[in-house]
Image (cartoon, grey):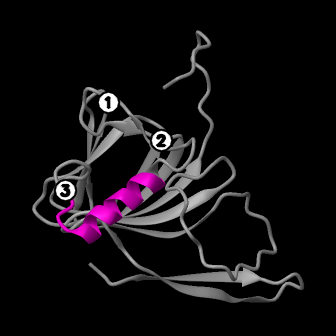
């Protein structure tokens, strides 16, 4: 796993001059022996321009509130992404706890769909680009998308779970955009 991901952000001053407003080293958050997350960049408010961003991004939630966005990178082991690779060291346990807190950091966060292990949804559209490896994404009806390096997945707030059973690590780049869940036809909130 890389020591860090360099995140370059270009901004624009009020007079229209563009510049590199920041470069930050984003360290991985290890959550297991080979699984980690990088919370690269995001914002909780709408994008407005000109935008001159000099403050480093500090992730408070994995999933953005309405109007915001997130850019994350995840590296998954050869296992059930969420359940099979348990933290082994104090650093991994602390990283796992940090990721859980960030996952559940706001109302767009993770909602479980038992009885299927790790089936969940978020009130976001996630746009994922698989950088390396292979991952399966399973829908609640049993449909499975087998993603290979170079594939793009658009996940629109639907129940799903990720799995990597192909014998090597997989790395995915994710952009999360928030949405608003509408009530069901009978007026009951969709969960």
Dot 2, crowdedness within 10 Å: few (<14), some or many (≥20)? Answer: many
Q: Residues within 10 Å of mark 3 (few under 14, many from 20)?
A: some
Residue 168 at x, y = what percent? 14, 66
The span shown in magenta is 85-102
Q: Which mark is residue 122?
A: 2
Q: Residue at x 14, y 53 (%)?
A: 165
Compute the Cα span from label 1 to label 2: 14 Å
| Image position, residue 64 (x, y; %) | 58, 52
Chief SS of the magenta region: helix
Name which residue lies at 66% across and 83% down: 10
Q: Which circle's residue, 3 or 1, is located before the other in the chain?
A: 3
The answer to which of marks 2 and 3 sits earlier in the sequence is 3
- Tell me, yes or no, whether the two marked residues, 2 and 3, touch with CB atoms within 8 Å: no
**Label 3, on which residue?**
86
| Residue 94 inside the magenta-drawn segment | yes
User: Is 148 a magenta residue?
Assistant: no
Secondary element at tag 3: loop
In this view, which residue lies farthest toward the top? Answer: 186
Q: Which residue is mark 1?
A: 140
> Total marks drawn?
3
- Local secondary structure at mark 1: loop
- Give x and y (percent) for residue 62: 49, 56
Instruction: Judge by depth and name the residue closer to the eye, 44 or 139.
Output: 44
From the viewer's perspective, tell me whether residue 124 is left or right of residue 74: right
Q: Position of residue 84 (x, y in %)?
A: 16, 51
Q: Residues within 10 Å of mark 1 (few under 14, many from 20)?
A: some
Q: Is residue 61 left or right of residue 20?
A: left
């Amino acid at each position: 796993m890389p020591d860090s991901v360099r995140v370059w952000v270009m901004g624009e001053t009020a007079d229209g001059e563009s510049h590199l407003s920041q470069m930050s080293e984003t360290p991985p958050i290890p959550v297991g022996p080979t699984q980690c997350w990088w919370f690269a960049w995001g914002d909780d408010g709408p994008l407005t321009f000109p935008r001159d961003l000099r403050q480093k991004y500090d992730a408070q939630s994995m999933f953005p509130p309405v109007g915001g966005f997130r850019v994350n990178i995840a590296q998954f082991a050869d296992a059930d992404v969420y359940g099979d690779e348990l933290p082994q060291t104090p650093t991994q346990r602390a990283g796992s706890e940090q990721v859980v807190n960030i996952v559940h950091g706001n109302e767009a966060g993770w909602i479980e769909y038992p009885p299927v292990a790790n089936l969940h949804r978020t009130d976001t559209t996630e746009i994922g680009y698989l950088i390396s490896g292979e991952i399966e994404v399973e829908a609640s009806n049993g449909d499975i998308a087998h993603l290979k390096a170079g594939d793009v997945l658009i996940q629109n707030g639907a129940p799903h779970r990720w799995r990597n059973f192909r014998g090597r690590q997989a790395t995915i780049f994710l952009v999360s955009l928030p949405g608003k869940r509408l009530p069901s036809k009978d007026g009951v909130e969709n969960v």
